Amino acid sequence: MLYEVATIVHYLFQIYFYMIIVYVLMSWLPNLRENFIGELLAKLVEPYLSPFRRFIPPIMGMLDISPIIALFVLQFAEQGVYAILRLFL
């Protein structure tokens, strides 16, 4: 049972990881975030990215590295969830 739950958790984290990457790549093309998928991704990803943007200022006023830090934190959170699952299952 632990394997099935861990697999589902892994896929959910991977989906969110790639959603963040797609959202960041969409920022390179200005009008891409204006369509339905861009707005949907913004609603799902921005609540997670906004605390990182608040505390990590852009480098030289342009380069926003907060999504990179957010992805690292997401990976650490995934490992934490695995540790908790091992304790309870």
Image (spheres, helix red, strand yellow):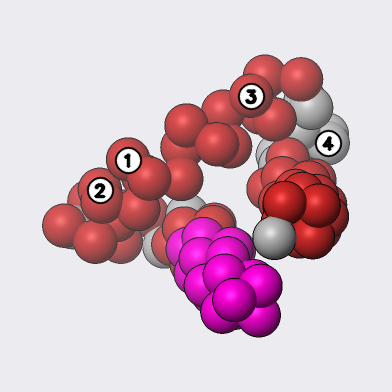
Q: Residues within 10 Å of mark 4 (few under 14, many from 20)?
A: few
Query: Could you tell me what secondary structure mostly forms the magenta stretch?
Result: helix
Q: Nearer the viewer, mark 1 or mark 4?
A: 1
Q: Is residue 22 above or below residue 63?
A: below
- Looking at the image, tell me whether mark 3 or mark 2 is earlier in sequence order: 2
Label at residue 59? 4
Residue receiving disc 1:
43
**Are the two marked residues, 3 and 4, in contact with CB atoms closer than 8 angstroms?**
no
Instruction: State how far apart marks 3 and 2 are (Cα).
Output: 19 Å
Secondary element at image label 2:
helix
Residue receiving disc 3:
51
Q: Seen in the image, is 65 located left or right of residue 43?
A: right
**Are the two marked residues, 4 and 2, in contact with CB atoms closer than 8 angstroms?**
no
Which residue appears at 59% of the width and 76% of the height?
A: 1
Which residue appears at 35% of the width and 53% of the height?
A: 41
Instruction: State how far apart marks 3 and 4 are (Cα).
Output: 17 Å
Instruction: State how far apart marks 1 and 2 are (Cα).
Output: 6 Å
